[in-house]
Amino acid sequence: MRMPTLLAAASSSVEVNPWMILPFGVLLFLIAAGPLFFEKWWHHQYPKVAVGLGLITVCYYLFILNNGGRLLHVAHEYVSFIALIGSLFVVAGGIHITVKGESRPFINVVFLFLGAVIANLIGTTGASMLMIRPWIRMNRYRITSFHVVFFIFIVSNVGGCLTPVGDPPLFLGFLKGVPFLWVLENLWVAWLIAVAILLGIFYVFDSINFRKPPAEVTDRMTASETWRFEGLPNIAFIVIIIAAVVGNKFLPPLVPDLLMIAAAAASFFTTSKSVHQSNDFNFAPIKEVAWLFIGIFATMIPALDYLEKHSAQLGLHTPMQFYWATGLLSGFLDNAPTYLTFLAAALGGQGLSINKPADIQTFLASDNHFLVAISLGAVFFGALTYIGNGPNFMVKNISQQLGVPTPSFFDYLLRYALPILIPVYALIAVLFFSRWRIF
């Protein structure tokens, strides 16, 4: 991606004190534990916590390392990241789907598959916000926890690994220099296998559930589905946003970001209030993402710079090891910084820098299985817990507001994620990263 001379010249060659990684670890711990153990305090204080921890790193790089160029480089990446996530969130909030009747298991499978595809066009956050309410309405006579869980598995996580737009980790990789089409070219087979297996498992569960209700309820459930879409002109704004992302490498710096922000503003002001009200649209979710990622982008700088020089200390040497390490940490931390952390480690192991797009190209040319492993680990395992990926908690909260039963944190992990996802992910590991790999 083209950047100003000062940004391109930013270097991480200075040795970083490993103690400066501590703010990054503290922030990730609080992001994971705050909503679970001290929700009220966290809800009011997280902006101060994120900014305060970020300022520690900013001061260190400005006054100790005298490396303001490194901060400018990261600031530009943060602006691009928030411009994409925020614009897709706003535009998706301007589209409303109305569903009448109730769906059979096959229709539910088709809906989830479409959600997996759409997630790559408007992001997993946008797709989750757009489709969770219709999903609940079309299953309202027999909605159970597993309907919410599989929506999180497929639409909020696994589905979004075909484009950099799909999931935040992949967009961060794009900002670092991973080609836009590399994701589709190298991950589509794993995407298809994982989505197909999860849809198959869901179909079995849903077929059993469909046969349980009394006959009078079943008659109502089998009524033909009637769909109505409002706010379809917003599709044009989605096209503009995607074009801005693709044009990142050709347009002057900040122009793609301004185009995305302009598309979001046009969408917001041209969408009728009734559509926003139907979607219960508000800016609270994206405000939370913006505040938290100020802290994440700042505090992860020392971690990334340190790993470039000391990645061998992690003891990771194969794509299989990177897949499981990235995945398991992504399940319990935010998967976006986890992706960058292990990408920096993989590059550092080959004497390359995550801050040099040319080094990214060299890395991909040597063996792209490492980046495939890191990408799949970050995106897929984000579904392992509610805290693995931002949309997970949003879907849970919306479902609860609409009276849908949702599993607790540990019930989700032990009853659904571990017994269902881990075998699927283990199969992916064997097919792609073991000595018996066929892809």
Image: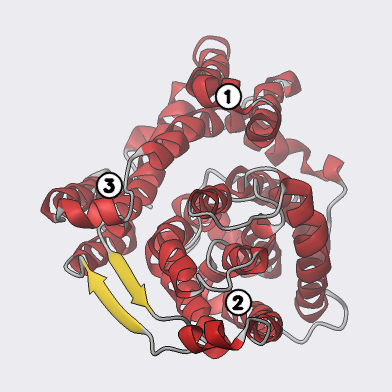
Q: Of marks 1 and 2, which one's residue comes earlier in the chain? A: 1
The percent position of residue 420, horizontal first and vertical second, equals 78, 70
Marks 3 and 2 sit apart, C-alpha to C-alpha, by 28 Å
- According to the image, label 3 marks what residue? 257
Q: Earlier in the sequence, mark 1 or mark 3?
A: 1
Amino acid marked by disc 3 = Asp
Instruction: Please say if the residues under marks 1 and 3 sit with CB atoms less than 8 Å apart.
Output: no
Q: Residue 158 sits in which quadrant?
A: bottom right
How dense is the environment of label 1, judged by Cα within 10 Å: few (below 14), some, or many (20 and up)?
few
**How many angstroms separate mark 1 from mark 3 (CA)?**
34 Å
User: Which quadrant holds residue 36?
Assistant: top right
Q: Residue furthest left?
A: 270
Decide: marks 3, 2 in contact (CB < 8 A)?
no
Which image quarter holds the C terminus? bottom right
- 247 in relation to 298, above or below: below
Which numbered disc covers residue 191?
Answer: 2
Please tell me which of labels 3 and 2 falls first in the chain. Answer: 2
Q: Position of residue 74 (x, y in %)?
A: 46, 35
Q: How many marks?
A: 3
Residue 189 point in image, percent of width and height: 62, 82
Q: Is residue 237 placed above or below 198 in the rendered structure?
A: above
Question: What whole-number distance in Å separates the C-alpha atoms at marks 1 and 2?
Answer: 37 Å
Q: Tell me the element at label 1.
A: helix
Residue under the image location 39 percent in, 35 percent down = 287
Disc 2 residue type? Answer: Trp
Q: Is residue 306 left or right of residue 58?
A: right
Q: Nearer the viewer, mark 1 or mark 3?
A: 1
Residue 329 appears in the rendering: no
Amino acid carrying mark 1 in the image: Lys
Q: Secondary structure at mark 2?
A: helix
Q: Residues within 10 Å of mark 2 (few under 14, many from 20)?
A: many
Residue 40 circle label: 1
